[in-house]
Structure formats: C-alpha cells, structure tokens
Amino acid sequence: MINAESIIYISTNLVWISLLISSILAFAVIIDRIIYLSKINRDEALFLNELISSIKEKDIKSALLICKTNKSPLFNIVANGLKNIEDMKEYMSNEANKEIPKLERFISVLSTISTIAPLLGLLGTILGMIEAFGVIAQDGGGDTLALANGIANALFTTAAGLIIAIPCVVSYNYFVHKINNKITSIESISSEIADIITKD
C-alpha cells in the first residue's frame, strides 16, 4: 500500500527526472539554434553578393542555382520569387510565411523551460520540507544535524531549477534578438532583389 512517504519519495524523483529532461532539452535546443543560425549566416556571407550580382546581370539561371545550393530562408524566398517573376513580391511574401517560422523553431521551448524549471525546483523543495517536517513530527526533531541535511537536500532542487532556467532566459532573449534582426535583414534584401528584377 502506498503511504504519504512513498508518494513524496516518488514525487521528488519525478521532479528530478523532469529537471533532468528539461536541462537536456534546453541544451539540445540551444545547440540546434546556434548551429542553424551560424550556417545560414555563413551561407549568406559567402554567396549573397554573388546572388545579387547575378540578379543585376539578369542571369536568373545562375541566381537560381545559388539559391538551390544554399538552403537558407533568404535563398528559398528569393528562389520562389525568381521562379514567379510576374508576381515576384507576392510569391516571396508567401514563401517568407513558410520560411520565417524555421528561424523561430523550438525557441518557445526555451521560454517554457525558463518558466517551469524554477517551479519544479520549488515543488521539489516543498516536498523535501514536507518530508523533513514529517521527521520532526515523528521523532521530535532530536537529530538536528540530520534535519539540517534534509532541508539542505530539499533546497538543491530549487538551485537546480534556477541553474537550468537562467541560461534558458539568456539564450531565449539572445535568439529572439538575433532572429528579429535576421527577419528584418531578409525583408530588406528580398525587397531590394525584387526592386532590381522589376525595375525597367
């Protein structure tokens, strides 16, 4: 039969498991976004000038080849516009609606973890305190050293939650800033390319 102590023990373990999963998930998202954003920035730095030169020379075939070779949101947007020059801006706008979410993928996970990790830590601490005061109720709190150790162990979950949440908050704000700048850059460059193509 499950008693109160067993429930607290199981709940505490679930808190630690949830914190561990949260930390692994946060780390995976941070690494994924760093790699993804670095790759598209590198591709644009290497090939953007070449792409614009090809477009200025009306060499659409070469421009499309560059876009096909480099699968970043900007190049995909431009490629869709170059394939439909008669309504280029409309097609680029439609493609942007598909591509921009790729920049924002998984970012909400960091926001969620930064919110729930401290709460999980606090829950773990509360469970630990309940357990510690249960010991006091049973034994009268005679072993103060054991009680202090029990409370200290309970507080570890709050510390763990904050250790997970703080990098998530910093990373989330960093990525949001980078992504907003990238979206602005994509809009500006796409508009510039559309103007080059459509001008007489």
Image: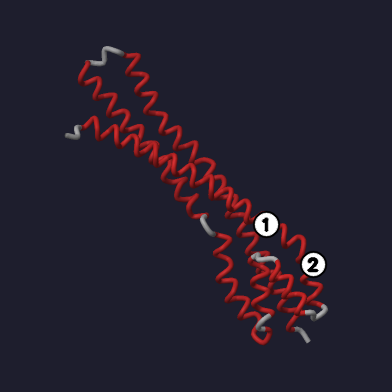
Residue 85, by quadrant, is bottom right
Kindly state the secondary structure of the residue where label 2 is placed. helix
Q: Is residue 101 left or right of residue 148?
A: right
Q: Residue at x 67, y 57 (%)?
A: 39
Q: Is residue 120 left or right of residue 188?
A: left
Q: Residue at x 53, y 48 (%)?
A: 28
Q: Nearer the viewer, residue 1 or 169?
A: 1
Kindly state the secondary structure of the residue where label 1 is placed. helix
Q: Is residue 153 left or right of residue 168?
A: left
Where is the N terminus found, in terms of image quarters? top left
Tell me if mark 1 has few (under 14), some (14-19) or many (20+) residues whose alpha carbon lies within 10 angstroms of its own. some
Residue 169 at x, y percent in the picture: 52, 45
Above or below 12: residue 46: below
Tell me how far mark 1 sits from mark 2, CA to CA.
17 Å
Q: Which residue lies under the disc numbered 1?
A: 39
Q: Residue at x 37, y 28 (%)?
A: 154
Q: Is residue 115 left or right of residue 70?
A: left
The residue mark sitting in front, 1 or 2, is 1
Q: Which residue type carries mark 1?
A: Lys
Q: Which residue lies under the disc numbered 2?
A: 49
Residue 98 at x, y percent in the picture: 55, 70
